[in-house]
Image (tube, grey):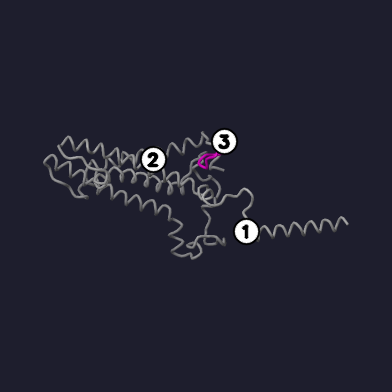
Amino acid sequence: MRGESLSDASLTGGNAERRSKGSGRQPKGAQTGLKALLRANGLSLVLLMLFIVLLGGQSVSGMYEYNEERSEHGERPLGLAEYLATGHFLEATAENWESEFLQMAAYVLLTAWLFQKGSSESKKLDEKEGVDRDLRQSNREDTPGPVRHGGWRLRLYEHSLSIAFLTLFLLSFILHAVGGAEEYSAEQRAHGGRGVSVLEYIGTARFWFESTQNWQSEFFALVGMVVLSIFLRERGSPESKPVDAPHSQTGSE
């Protein structure tokens, strides 16, 4: 009798499981719709929101600052739409993007080859990690298309992150030069001088001062991130080692 009861219970449980799967119901506690979207993409959405808000703040404050300069030369103030088309705005925006994308490109490339003992930002010193494996032998079903196709697609894809950041850096570098040349030329003409071409502006001390003052700050921040993560912790952050990890532990896990 006991064996029959266990068998019946097993069949009942199996039928219930099949009914649950067949009904398409989500497991208890699972989030759906907007909540699920926000949870799955919260980091990028918050960062994008902060970018938009701060870019708006830069635009408005930059317009007021630029109009103060114009009023000193007896020129009429510009509206926001007009200001956004000026070299002043383009130069200020692009020179910051330029340094950020240079920072990220350099960090991606340097962390592929160099190590820092004890830092959560470094690969382990004496172990091969998942990012180092040869994906030409991967048999995962959910692997990205370029990995399945192999050849030149895979060679391009396995370095696509650094390529993307370097491309964005070069585009920002060009925009910085274009906006800077326009703003520099306007200043020169206001004082009776002549304007300069983009290539001429790239050859000025001002252009390289603007660039290097931002570049050095980005690399200084990276030094801080790498070194401070050896000794300090942030519970819950993937950029930190576990709180109880020894200082000598390299990598986040």
Q: Find the distance from the CA under tag 3 to the CA under tag 2.
A: 26 Å
Q: Nearer the viewer, residue 135 or 92?
A: 92
Percent of width and height locating residue 70: 19, 38
- The residue segment tinted magenta is 236-242
Q: Earlier in the sequence, mark 3 or mark 2?
A: 2
Percent of width and height locating residue 158: 46, 57
Task: Give the foreground label among 2 and 1.
Answer: 1
Residue that appears at 46% across and 65% down: 151
Q: Quadrant of the N terminus?
A: bottom right
Q: Is residue 10 left or right of residue 66?
A: right
The amino acid type of the residue labelled 2 equals: Phe
- For mark 2, give the secondary structure: helix
Which numbered marker is on residue 24?
1
Percent of width and height locating residue 212: 31, 41
Q: Main secondary structure of the magenta part?
A: loop
Tell me the crowding category of disc 2: few under 14, some 14 to 19, or many 20 or more residues within 10 angstroms, Cα based. Answer: some
The amino acid type of the residue labelled 1 equals: Gly
Residue that appears at 17% across and 34% down: 72
